Image (cartoon, helix red, strand yellow):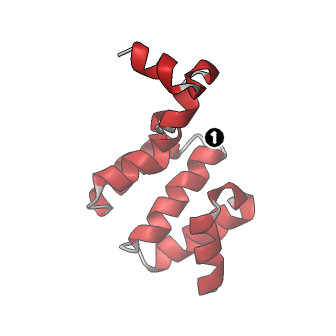
Amino acid sequence: MNQQRIYDWIKHPEKLNRESLYELRTLLAKYPYFHTARLLYLKNLYLLHDISFGEELRRSALYINDRKALFYLVEGDRYTLKALEKKLPEVCNSLEYCFSRF
């Protein structure tokens, strides 16, 4: 495993697959306190809907000191904020209509 592959998985977690799961598991066996590898391993288990995800999540909570990173890694897709411009209706393009609403 090389450093560039880990950077690639950090930037594009959708590239995680069965092969990366094996590589990350091997890396964690060698370096159990490597937080980035543990987070990527959990994300990989989550994306593959692996049956051991719950057990590994409980175990990893002991190793990872930043629980916010752990939460947003797993549940972050559900809690993203939409841009304000996307929420505004198309009618709000005219300033008079937008100011009349307030």
- Whether residue 70 sits left or right of residue 11 in the image: it is left
Mark 1: secondary structure:
loop
Q: Quadrant of the C terminus?
A: top left
- Residue 98 higher or lower than 50, as above or below: above
The answer to whether residue 84 shows anywhere in this view is yes
- The residue sitting at 57% across, 73% down in the picture is 26
Of residues 61 and 84, the one nearer the viewer is 84
> Mark 1: which amino acid?
His
Where is residue 4? Give x, y as percent: 64, 83
Which residue is the site of mark 1? 49
- The residue sitting at 46% across, 40% down in the picture is 75
- The residue sitting at 71% across, 60% down in the picture is 15
The answer to whether residue 1 shows anywhere in this view is no
Where is residue 59? Give x, y as percent: 36, 53
- Residue 99 higher or lower than 80, as above or below: above
Residue 14's quadrant in the figure?
bottom right
Where is residue 24? Give x, y as percent: 58, 69
- Whether residue 42 sits left or right of residue 69 in the image: it is right
Where is residue 73? Give x, y as percent: 47, 50
- The residue sitting at 46% across, 37% down in the picture is 81
Callout 1: few (<14), some (14-19), or many (20+) C-alpha neighbours within 10 Å? few
Residue projecting furthest to the front: 96
